[in-house]
Image: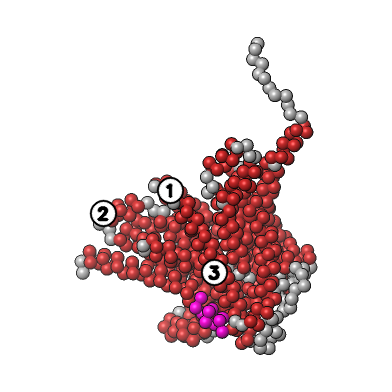
Amino acid sequence: MNRTARRNITNNVMLTLTGLCTIVTSSVLFLILGFLVFNGWRSLNLDFFTKLPLSAGEVGGGMANAIVGSFELILVAAVIGIPVGFLGGIYLAEFGGKTFSMLVRYTADLLNGVPSIVIGIFAWTVVVVKMHHFSAWAGGFALSMMMVPIGLRATEQFLRAVPDSLREGSLALGASKTRTILQVVVPAARQGILTGMILGVARIAGETAPLLFTSFNNQYWAKNLDEPTASLPVMIYTHAISPFDDWHRQAWAAGLVLLVLVLLANVACRWVLSRGMAAQRG
Amino acid sequence: MGTAVATAPPPSQARKLTKFWRDGDQIAHLVTFIFAASVFVVTVWLVYELWIHSAPSRAKFGFGFLTGTTWDPVAVQFGALPFIYGTVLTSLLALLISVPLGVGAAIFLAELAPPALSNACTFLVELLAAVPSVILGLLAIFTLVPIMRQYIEPFLKDTLGSLPLFQGPAYGVGYLTSGIILATMTFPFIISISREALLAVPREQREAALALGATKWESTWQVVVPFAKLGIIGSIFLALARALGETMAVTMVIGNDTGIHTSLLSPGYTIAAIIANEFTEATGDVYLSSLVELGLVLFAVTMVLNGAAQLLIVATTRKGSKRD
């Protein structure tokens, strides 16, 4: 076999292999979705959304408290995380000096990379230890810390994409800088910032590790945010590792609900973002 | 001399104050500054709390904590080595699978696929990164673990059983299963970032190689990939940092065994998994602070890796844009 033929064969073999890699990696999502729909669909019923979990071994019941609990936790996280991310992002894009902004950006990236279980330990030390009990506050606080870096960088990025001529126009009309930001720059970047925030929410919606020892879990309704609170991800975890068939069934149902919500949020955000970018270019 | 310049009378204190409040620029600056600074403060606070709460363990075991091999809550003896070993081993197994797969797919998506297909596949892969890890754990328990136990692990033992790496009973759970799950969580990062790095390579590089008679693969492997090397390595670092810190999916399939085993089929433990499993049950200062210290170790390692990854990725994007 001559040299050219060998090179051509290598070429074809390697290029085919990279194609195979792509097929394998792109199909994993469908595999996951397929398994969850197959197993979860049979387990979903009205009880799942309206009833409380039954004690171990009993057949039936639902996860109504975990669904509500998850929304409560996300709400607490959003109430803390969105203002910090949004206002911090405005500082970075509109006010910040060079050195300090670099520092904040760098720490935001670091915070983004902190393992979620370590965030859980932190929330435990500063909230649970001080309050002496698990609560939705602690869980929401932990989740908010995972949300802030995403919101911050999204806000900064989309504010920076607003052309300077808009700012100059507003300032030339005599508006103060604050007014310019609030009434001209932020509205122009509204869509991007909003989708960034939703992506942040979608990220924390499925987080489990930071909740294990902050909001903990609860078989019943939590009366207020000051009590241990059930959440879908923690329920999936506890039910999946339990030895009971009916709990496994419920874990699949919960997994399907959670995955569909998270994926829908992601698809919607990416669709809006890509449309926005196309509009900007066009 | 007539150089007197007409100056407005200095505004009164009251007027200055009104202007200050009306414009609100200073206030807005201050408020947004406080929020931006809070990100920095909280991160420093996090390190401080981890340091303070791990004090009893650090005082009792010192650096021996990192090399100790017993984990015995009853005798209050804690050593981190089995967990460090498990964390490193599962992450390396994950990279062993996800690096060839991820870089291969990134090459296909950046060099060969038509843009529409490339974007669609990247979209699917990035969606995969959004799948909550507890859901991957759920799938792993009920689908991957039985497959590993019944087919793959017996097969590995039959073919490679003479190696110390593939011995012992096939439990289904353990280092190898965790590595596979971690691989599916890490390759989205490798693909998405490596693809960007490859796309940033200037067109002339490819054209020059092809004009010299290189095949498509030779131009890709010997010219384009080396050019994007730093970015690809950066993506691998990011993937490694993610794998080291990953908690839920691994906790569900690692098998919870506090020993150190050479066999990849054996159950083990990782840092994140032991924290997740034992934190709420830990009694006593030393036990609890040992778990916090494990968290501190995990934090330190992932921070170093993340920092290095950021630098590498920034370096490649700069290089690409400079030569454009």
What chain letter is assigned to the residue under label 2?
B
- The count of marks equals 3
Q: Nearer the viewer, mark 1 or mark 2?
A: 1
How far across and how far down the image is residue B295, in percent?
65, 65
Q: Is residue A156 above or below residue B55?
A: above
Q: Neighbour class for label 2 at 10 Å: few (<14), some, many (≥20)?
A: few
Q: Secondary structure at mark 2?
A: loop
Q: Can you say which quadrant of the picture contains the N terminus of chain A?
A: bottom left
The residue at 70%/43% (across/down) is: B27
Q: Neighbour class for label 1 at 10 Å: few (<14), some, many (≥20)?
A: few
- Residue picked out by circle 3: A263
Q: Alpha carbon of mark 2 to alpha carbon of mark 3: how far? A: 46 Å
The residue at 56%/39% (across/down) is: A168
The amino acid marked with disc number 3 is: Leu
The residue at 49%/82% (across/down) is: B148
Q: In the drawing, what numbered circle is on residue B321?
A: 1
Q: Does A143 lie within the magenta span?
A: no
Toward the viewer: A197 or A240? A197
Q: In the drawing, what numbered circle is on residue B100?
A: none
How far across and how far down the image is residue A60, in percent?
66, 86
Display coloring: secondary structure
Predominant SS of the magenta segment: helix
How far across and how far down the image is residue A124, in percent?
72, 66
Q: Residue B113 vs residue B146: left or right?
A: left
- Residue picked out by circle 2: B212
The magenta segment is A33-42
